Amino acid sequence: MTALMPTYQRYDIAFVQGDGAWLQGDDGRRYLDFGAGIAVAGLGHCHPHLVATLREQAGKLWHCSNLYRIPDQERLAARLVAASFADAAFFCNSGAEALECGLKLVRKYHDMAGAPERYRVITFAGAFHGRTLATIAAGGSAKHLDGFAPAVEGFDQVPFADLAAARAAIGDETAAILVEPVQGEGGIRPVPEGFLAGLRALADEFGLLLFFDEVQCGIGRTGRLFAHQWADVEPDLIAVAKGLGGGFPVGACLASGQAARTLTPGSHGSTFGGNPLAMAVANAVLDVVLADGFLERVAAAGATLRSRLAALPARYPGVIAEVRGHGLMIGLKCVQPNSVLVERLLGDGLLTVPAADNVVRLLPPLIIGESEIETASAIIDRVCAALVEKAA
């Protein structure tokens, strides 16, 4: 019997070593990692620049508290601001914390503007924004809310990518619109072209803050630093995490304009957020991701992977219904339960991640190469063929 709380249904394997896009299990086998720790290990496992940076910083200083200046924190904030819409950043430890920061900021922003009654946030069906009481209420999933009643008040959910429904949901108490440019947990669903621009127009018309959740789709995952940059739309604030630390826990809430000046001393904080270890690693991640040509290579790799998988629905209609996504964030919508495909791929040495809408997520490291794409595509094709044969 394990002493762990039973919050996960774990596969019976442990990994003991990683190298790039590969993991070695305690069973002695090598596995091609197309889950990347759920879009976290964006630079793969044991990236030499990240390892060297972490080792160097570990020998200097781990923690000193935000009571004092942390130079690498200032540097990381400046780099994120220079590469985005933002004017300021707050650092924390996870995506959920970044979302919580943003939700608090939304309320404080309107309170400072003399409208404390404006606190409600419009969200979209299929969303996932974290596991805190507030963020499960924002996500609205019955599965995630079960057993945690009463749900935190203040969220109005409308159908996915329904601009008319979003407009209809706006009332005197509405403060913000919260959306993932590409839903991850919801089943790898990019919003339609023009939708983010439509939300920007709504926010401007009604004096709302536009809040993007880029915890999973940000930090290069789609071939741009942030997914919303493909739409040429600027939000008022975004939440990022996962890939920002390349495996080290770090999150950030970025904001612009007056929103960037809303949180004042004492209004928010974090004991561990922005600590020297996390900041050193996150800066090392940006060293790689912002280097010339890196994001272009991610976009090209995503296009290659998508092209290798495009024929699956026609070739195996009893297994794959649809291939969708953006960049290196691809979903295989299954005909059979997605758990079947995930388990069969695992058995053949390919790690993937299940999602809602009966989807299997492919979230390989951003450093993935042509040979690994070919290997993964061959495994997926072989497993799909075996499932067809089994069904027959």
Image (cartoon, grey):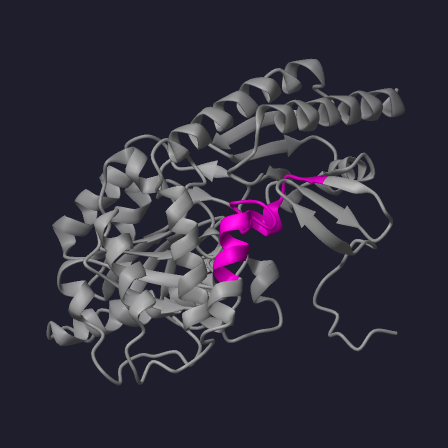
Image position of 274 with respect to 65: above or below: above
The segment highlighted magenta reads 32-54
Horizontally, residue 240 falls left or right of residue 265, namely right
Residue 9 percent coordinates (x, y): 75, 59
Inspect this view and state whether residue 322 appears.
yes
Residue 92 percent coordinates (x, y): 40, 69
**The quarter of the displayed image where residue 229 is located:** top left
Horizontally, residue 210 falls left or right of residue 258, namely right
If the image is split into quadrants, where does the C terminus sit? top right
Residue 47 percent coordinates (x, y): 55, 48
**The quarter of the displayed image where residue 266 is located:** bottom left
Residue found 65% across the figure and 22% down from its top = 374
**Towards the viewer: 349 or 344:** 349
Magenta stretch contains residue 288: no
**Towards the viewer: 138 or 267:** 267
Residue found 46% across the figure and 67% down from its top = 57
Residue found 47% across the figure and 51% down from its top = 243
Inspect this view and state whether residue 218 appears.
no
Horizontally, residue 218 falls left or right of residue 115, namely right
